[in-house]
Image: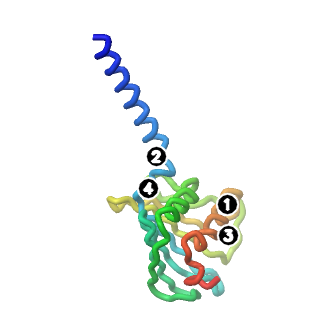
């Protein structure tokens, strides 16, 4: 009887640990399995305009539209590690699953590029963040730095040309 109760208690404890791990992983790790897409909008000048799709397996599709070195669709394998770095870098800015959000401004500078960042689940459900690079705040400056680093992270520099 004591052994049976001990096994039941151990099972309950282990199940509780699993639930805690799953809950803790809901934030950044929610991106595991999600496709990450982002597009860069034009500015009032010759800023590169393009869209990128990154699959969880690290497959990258680049669609160069304006003022880029490679126009049209290009593909490369950046690797699972690159996908995970991207997902982790964007995790602090990711809205709640299924939501659409826009970054908030403390100050606004005009004529800047914008981003549309989408996390797409296996079921097709999108979580979207839109961001104007001219929307200034400490959080947005940090997001701008993240987005500045994404082309190098994914090996897109030669296609963008800047």
Q: Nearer the viewer, mark 4 or mark 1?
A: 4
Q: Which residue is found at the position 51% from the left and 62% from the top?
A: 81
Residue 26: assigned label: 2
- Give the quadrant of residue 57: bottom left
Q: Which residue is found at the position 46% from the left and 87% from the top?
A: 72
The residue where tag 4 is placed is: 32
Instruction: Say which label, 4 or 1, has the lower sequence index.
Output: 4
Q: Nearer the viewer, mark 4 or mark 3?
A: 4
Q: Position of residue 129 (x, y in %)?
A: 52, 62
The residue where tag 1 is placed is: 142
Marks 4 & 3, CB-CB < 8 Å contact:
no
Instruction: Say which label, 2 or 4, has the lower sequence index.
Output: 2
The residue where tag 3 is placed is: 134
Q: Which residue is found at the position 55% from the left and 83% from the top?
A: 159
Q: How many angstroms separate mark 4 from mark 3 (CA)?
A: 30 Å
Q: Position of residue 112 (x, y in %)?
A: 65, 75
Instruction: Say which label, 3 or 1, has the lower sequence index.
Output: 3
Q: Nearer the viewer, mark 2 or mark 3?
A: 2
Residue at disc 3, secondary structure? loop
Marks 2 & 3, CB-CB < 8 Å contact:
no
Instruction: Say which label, 4 or 3, has the lower sequence index.
Output: 4
Instruction: Say which label, 2 or 3, has the lower sequence index.
Output: 2
Establish if 12 lies above or below 131.
Answer: above
């Amino acid at each position: 009887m004591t052994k049976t109760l001990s096994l039941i208690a151990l099972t309950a404890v282990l199940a509780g640990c699993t639930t805690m791990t799953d809950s803790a992983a809901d934030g950044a790790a929610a991106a595991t399995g999600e496709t990450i897409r982002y597009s860069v909008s034009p500015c009032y000048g010759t800023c590169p305009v393009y869209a990128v799709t990154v699959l969880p397996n690290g497959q990258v599709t680049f669609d160069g539209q304006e003022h880029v070195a490679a126009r049209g669709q290009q593909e490369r394998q950046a690797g699972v590690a690159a996908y995970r770095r991207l997902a982790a870098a964007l995790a602090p800015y990711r809205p709640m699953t299924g939501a659409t959000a826009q970054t908030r401004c403390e100050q606004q500078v005009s004529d800047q590029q914008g981003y549309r960042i989408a996390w797409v689940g296996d079921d097709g459900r999108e979580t979207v963040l839109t961001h104007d690079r001219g929307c200034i705040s400490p959080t947005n400056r940090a997001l701008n730095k993240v987005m500045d680093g994404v082309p190098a992270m994914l090996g897109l520099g030669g296609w963008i040309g800047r």
